Amino acid sequence: MKLVVIGGTGLIGRPLVALLQDWGHHVVAASPSTGVDAVTGVGLTDAMAGAWVVIDVSNAPSFADDAVLGFFRTGTANVIAAAREAGVAHVVALSVVGTDRLQASGYFRAKLEQERLVASSGLPFTLVRATQFFEFLATIADGYTRKDGVHLPQLAFQPIAAADVSAMLAELAIASPANGIVDVAGPERGSMAEFVASWLGARDDPRHIVVTAEKDYFGATIDDDALVPGGEARIMPTRFDAWLHAVTPAATAATAATAA
Ligand SMILES: NC(=O)c1ccc[n+]([C@@H]2O[C@H](COP(=O)([O-])OP(=O)(O)OC[C@H]3O[C@@H](n4cnc5c(N)ncnc54)[C@H](OP(=O)(O)O)[C@@H]3O)[C@@H](O)[C@H]2O)c1
């Protein structure tokens, strides 16, 4: 079966392409660096020819409100038009858990527009909403760093390994379209501050956490539980400490020293 992965060179796209190829599928990684641009439409028709499934895991190069809305609005419309022309039988797009509850943020208004375009395309579809990736903790720590520490809100958080998101997307892409939303999350729930503190600690990063009263998520005021699944969700297996040990040699060395 031929599948096209829009954004197939990114954090989620790369392992997704590799996994589907391992399963014996013909997979096209479509992104600007492979000659396919969803926003201008360049290369889309050729990439999509003969495809059965398209999975959109692209992300915008700029998160400025207008730029990100333009990216998801135009890119998604072009992907859907090309998919329709090619007779694609399943459109899958990756979004974020709580996107509808995060509308104070320009990024999430753009993601909701992407979801709306997919759901109203008339093509069979699956919208996969994932929680924040473990790999995104570095961006969170940097984004909330002030002179005297990392100022973090006390928000509920249930992050997930990027590899688990890719695995779930691969499984859902070759299954029957859900024609709805599937939430996917990691196995442990805590606070955003706790996860960032563990991440900093494992890397011997000297920045300390200051927990703040503001419920701020990158400039948008949100509810305590806006980032975690509110109902049924697919829970993926990779635990945060296992991932931490895999990506931070310092943490692994410390564990080995303690065990010895
Ligand atoms: N970060 C999180 O915690 C989180 C949580 C849930 C969901 N998500 C969603 O996950 C998705 C993927 O994120 P990611 O971290 O894997 O992104 P990423 O690593 O930044 O990769 C972005 C991908 O999009 C491609 N791309 C950029 N402009 C494009 C265009 N004009 N046409 C086609 N492809 C284009 C890039 O291609 P090049 O390599 O050629 O530039 C790259 O392959 C996003 O939609 C995001 O909303 C993120």
Image (cartoon, grey):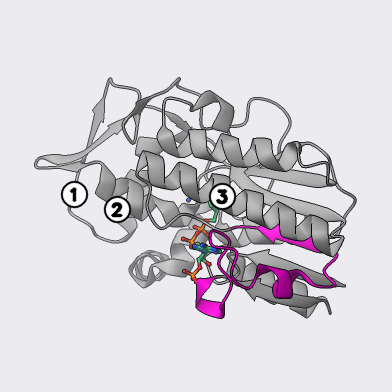
Residue at point 41%, 70% (across, down): 256
Q: Residue 20, located in which quarter of the rendered image?
A: bottom right
Q: Is residue 6 visible?
A: yes
Q: Is mark 3 within 8 Å of ligand 1?
A: no
**Residue 211: image x %, image y %?**
26, 29
Does the beta carbon at disc 1 come under 8 Å from ligand 1?
no
In-front residue for pair 100/252: 100
Q: Is residue 114 left or right of residue 248?
A: right
The C terminus, quarter of image: bottom left
Which residue is depicted at the point 65% across and 55% down? Answer: 78
Amino acid type at image mark 1: Arg
Query: Which mark's residue is nearer the viewer, 3 or 2?
Result: 3
Magenta-span inclusion, residue 37:
yes
- Do tag 1 and tag 2 residues touch (Cβ < 8 Å)? yes
In the picture of the structure, the residue carrying the numbered disc 1 is 207
Residue at (88, 55) in percent of width and height: 175
In the rendered structure, which amino acid carries the disc numbered 3? Thr
203 displayed left or right of 160: left
Q: Position of residue 196 (x, y in %)?
A: 35, 45
What's the magenta region?
Answer: 32-57
- Tell me residue 193's x, y (percent): 35, 37
Instruction: Report the front residue among 134 and 15.
Output: 15
Q: Tell me the SS state at disc 1.
A: loop
Residue density around tag 2, few if under 14, some if 14–19, many if 20 or more, within 10 Å = some
SS for callout 3: helix
Q: Determine which residue is flagged by label 3.
A: 74
